[in-house]
Image (cartoon, grey):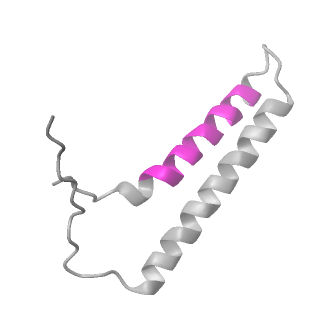
Amino acid sequence: MRMTNFQVAHRDKQEPTATLLVRVIVCLALFVGGLALIGIGSDGADAENLGSALTFVGGIVLISLAFGLPMMGATER
């Protein structure tokens, strides 16, 4: 059985520290906001309350964005 060699794509130019810091803060805010929306949406969990369901789903979308945004522009070798 042959194992594959996993290699991380080499970055030619590092982004400025301020850009990375802003990206981390934005993703953290999206993640925490998504958790808050999930909590708010699950608080009024009635089968007939569409607003709670949409709030819950909005929280899932925000958390997905928090994990997905850093991956934009990534390439696989």
Q: Which of 53 and 17 is in front in this view?
A: 17
On screen, residue 31 versus residue 47, left or right, reads: left
Q: Nearer the viewer, residue 67 or 26?
A: 67
Residue at 37% over, 55% down = 71
On screen, residue 16 versus residue 37, left or right, reads: left
Q: Nearer the viewer, residue 68 or 6?
A: 6
Magenta-drawn stretch contains 9: no
On screen, residue 42 versus residue 73, left or right, reads: right
Q: How many marks?
A: 0
On screen, residue 67 versus residue 41, left or right, reads: left
Residue 53 rendering spot, x and y as whole percentages: 70, 26
Residue at 77% over, 34% down = 41
Magenta-drawn stretch contains 55: yes
Q: Quadrant of the N terminus?
A: top left
Residue 32 rendering spot, x and y as whole percentages: 68, 55
Q: Is the magenta stretch mostly helix, strand or loop?
A: helix
Q: Which residue range is magenta in the image? A: 52-68
Residue 40 rendering spot, x and y as whole percentages: 80, 39
Q: Which of 39 and 58 is in front in this view?
A: 39
